[in-house]
Amino acid sequence: MRNLWMAAGLLLGTVAFTSCDSGTKETDSNTTVDTAASDTPVADVSLTDEKREFMAYAYNISNQQVELGKLAVEKGLSPQVKEYGQRMIDLYGKKLEELGEMSGQYQVTLPETMTEDQAGRVQELRETETGKFDRAYWDNVIDAHKDAADEFDDNVKDVAETDNTAFNFWARNTAKEIRAHMEQAMRFRLDLKN
């Protein structure tokens, strides 16, 4: 009788344990989706040509922000410029790593150099006189964020909130971050004394 009670207890424990997982797994030949985790990215191996181009653009934008940040750390006069520049190096350096990982998943070749416009913006800032650097940095970084925000908005506006493939999830979150970085830079720019 004791063995019967132990077996029943184990059976009930097993049933209770397995019923705790409220998510269901749906599979097809390419993807496994956990419906309980709708806010995490899911594996996706396909990417449209448009999204491939956008991934390359996002990589260039991240690279540009890192380069602008390096200049801010090197040439900035105010602590705000130097600190903001270092944050951009750290944040967008992480974005470059994330995009590098995703490019392998999606088999996308990322660009080795920035676009001519992006490289020109970095070069222009590099050549700015020291006394005028801080103002020029804020102007450049705000313009770069505006351009990026517009491009991100165009590319994520049609992506449903429930489309949590790795790249779409990353792009939606990055779009929000870019807007926040731009707004912060605009506030700092206003704080500059004329």
Image (cartoon, rainbow, N blue to C red):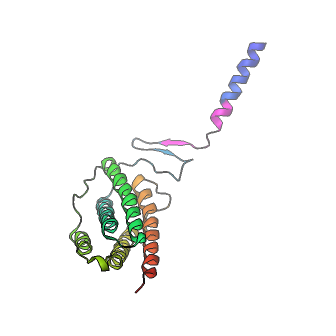
Asked if residue 23 lies in the magenta stretch, the reply is yes
* Residue drawn at 35 percent across, 51 percent down: 102
User: Residue 110 placed where, x, y %?
Assistant: 26, 56
Residue 23 seen from this side: yes
User: Residue 193 placed where, x, y %?
Assistant: 42, 84
In the rendered image, the vertical position of residue 191 relative to residue 24, given as above or below: below
* Residue drawn at 29 percent across, 64 percent down: 67
Query: Which residue is farthest bottom?
Result: 194
User: Residue 166 placed where, x, y %?
Assistant: 41, 52
User: Residue 168 placed where, x, y %?
Assistant: 42, 58
Query: Which residue is farthest right?
Result: 1
The number of numbered discs placed on residues in the rendered structure image is: 0
In this orientation, which residue lies closer to the viewer: 183 or 127?
A: 127
Q: In which quarter of the image is residue 6?
A: top right
In the rendered image, the vertical position of residue 182 relative to residue 28, given as above or below: below
182 vs 23, left or right, is left
* Residue drawn at 25 percent across, 77 percent down: 128
In this orientation, which residue lies closer to the viewer: 155 or 142?
A: 142
Which quadrant does the N terminus fall into?
Answer: top right
* Residue drawn at 23 percent across, 67 percent down: 115
Residue 46 seen from this side: no
Q: What stretch is highlighted in magenta?
A: 15-26
144 vs 41, left or right, is left
